[in-house]
Amino acid sequence: MTTRPVPLRRGWSVAAAVLGSLLALVTTGSPARHAVASLVTGSRTGTVQLPVLPLLGAVVLAVAVAFLVCRTAARRG
């Protein structure tokens, strides 16, 4: 967290973070959106559905991000 951001120009790292956060919340396949929708549905119906597919999607996304971070860190030295 104390290193410089990957985008080298000023302002792009903040814009990328905001856009990524917004897309993670509003896209159809978003694990965050599905979790909120499941919470709302569960409170209305009283039943809980296990979010297996969104969980797998979140794990795949986390692995991809970790891979890209490791490659970026290796290039920086």
Image (cartoon, helix red, strand yellow):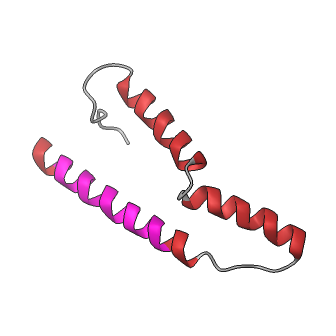
The residue drawn where x is 80% and y is 62% is 40
**Left/right of residue 7 with respect to residue 36 in the rendered view:** left
Viewer-proximal residue among 7 and 36: 36
Quick check: 54 above or below 20?
below
Q: Residue at x 33, y 56 (%)?
A: 65
Looking at the image, which residue is at 13% across and 42% down? 76
Residue 37 falls left or right of residue 17? right
**Quadrant in which the C terminus is drawn:** top left
Apparent side of residue 59 relative to residue 39 in the rendered image (left or right): left
- List x then y, in percent, for residue 67: 25, 59
Q: Is residue 38 magenta?
A: no
Residue 2 x %, y %: 35, 38
Q: Decide: is 57 above or below 6.
A: below
Is residue 44 visible to us here? yes
* Image quadrant assignment for residue 46: bottom right
Is residue 77 visible from the viewing direction of this image?
A: no
Residue at screen point 36% across, 25% down: 12
Question: Left or right: where does residue 16 sit relative to residue 23?
Answer: left
The chief SS type of the magenta part is helix
In the image as oriented, which residue stretches furthest toward the top?
10
- Give the residues drawn in magenta, as a range: 56-73
Q: From the image, which quarter does the N terminus lie in?
A: top left
